[in-house]
Image (cartoon, coloured by chain):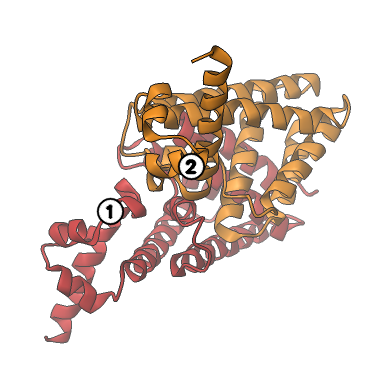
Chain colours: A red, B orange
Amino acid sequence: MPRGTADNTRNRILKAADRLFYQNGISQVSIDQIAEQAGVTKKTIYYHFDAKDTLIAAYLQYRDDTTLHWLIAQAEAAGDNTDDQINALFAGLTGWAQSSAFEGCPFARAASDLAHRPGHPALAVGAAHKKKHLDWLIDLAQRAENAEPDLVGKQLLVLIDGAIATTLVTTDPTYFDAARRAALLLLGASQ
Amino acid sequence: MPRGTADNTRNRILKAADRLFYQNGISQVSIDQIAEQAGVTKKTIYYHFDAKDTLIAAYLQYRDDTTLHWLIAQAEAAGDNTDDQINALFAGLTGWAQSSAFEGCPFARAASDLAHRPGHPALAVGAAHKKKHLDWLIDLAQRAENAEPDLVGKQLLVLIDGAIATTLVTTDPTYFDAARRAALLLLGASQ
């Protein structure tokens, strides 16, 4: 198989897995369903991913790249001012939470689905994603000249994950605005 | 069947469902497994709960009662001072997050598992639970004489749900301490 074709097929499988795993939950989707959605055979899926657990980890790796890219793009579109970046980031998250595509944080959902399977390869991908997200938030707190950027970076991550989790349960997106206001206050405070 | 016996059986089923649904996820546990854990027949389960979905909603109702009772008891054990109550609440949550029983917020996990099933009876139970939790946090903000208790109550709920979600993915419980410090700052600020 020419390399380009193999890459295209792999990507098609990943996109199908991404859609189905995120919409329906990783434990509720079979390899058969992903094969059907991607328009490939089960054998082709197992040629690219040796087991469903490998595909789950690859799905979260794909989400890791696309999510971080999207988050940073939301913030940086607002320019260099860190308060503007926070406002833009939460505006982007609120728009997502109000869309029909919103089913919560894919990393939290996977961690929840795999809570009884410590050591699953997807759990490490989720933890690494949050670390990268945290590093970017610490950098933002440093740029804001906050006196405790490591602490405030963690607080910003908790506010983002919390607004997503609370909104998923309550279906009330005003929690994002409450979280945004808390983020601005914490970022501006030199504790 | 005498009423007392029926209540005991119902409770035994609920406790078995609570353990299995929380540990393994509601979509990954069968009625057969719950029957085995509770030491009853499937027929007995369907005598008390007409369908698995009814049992899922009853499980979250049971969690609603026990969780709120536990949260308020943690806080009130610290006395009347609202800062002490926040510290005690987060100390309790941190202890839970560090225990082997920790698998994240049961309401967020159920919302995640049922994200593709709008209208499921358990989703309303989860939303009602967060509303009761929010009301208690608004009351705490009022007792702290915060100028915007409705806003700060929401921010406290986001910090609690966020610390739980971020810790589930990262397995790093220091997010609870970051959230606790944010909660104290927000509660003390008259914005």
* Protein chain holding label 1: A
SS class, disc 1 = loop
Residue assigned mark 1: A29
Q: Give the amino acid type for the residue marked by disc 2 in the picture.
A: Phe
Whether residue A33 sits left or right of residue B48 in the image: it is: left
Give percent across and percent down for residue B184: 78, 38
Q: To which residue does mark 2 refer?
A: B21
Up the image or down, B50 lies above or below B31; here it is: above
Q: Is residue B36 left or right of residue A24?
A: right
B135 and A144: which is toward the camera:
B135
Quadrant of the drawing holding the N terminus of chain A? bottom left
Lateral position of residue B119 relative to residue B10, left or right: left
Query: What x and y, as percent, mark residue B123?
Result: 42, 29
Is residue B126 at least partly visible in the picture? no
Q: Residue at x 35, y 65 (%)?
A: A62
Residue drawn 61% across the image and 46% down it: B164
Q: Which residue corresponds to the image point at 87% horizontal and 27% vertical from the top-left?
A: B81
Q: Callout 2 environment at 10 Å: few (<14), some (14 to 19), or many (20+)? A: many
Q: Amino acid at mark 1?
A: Val
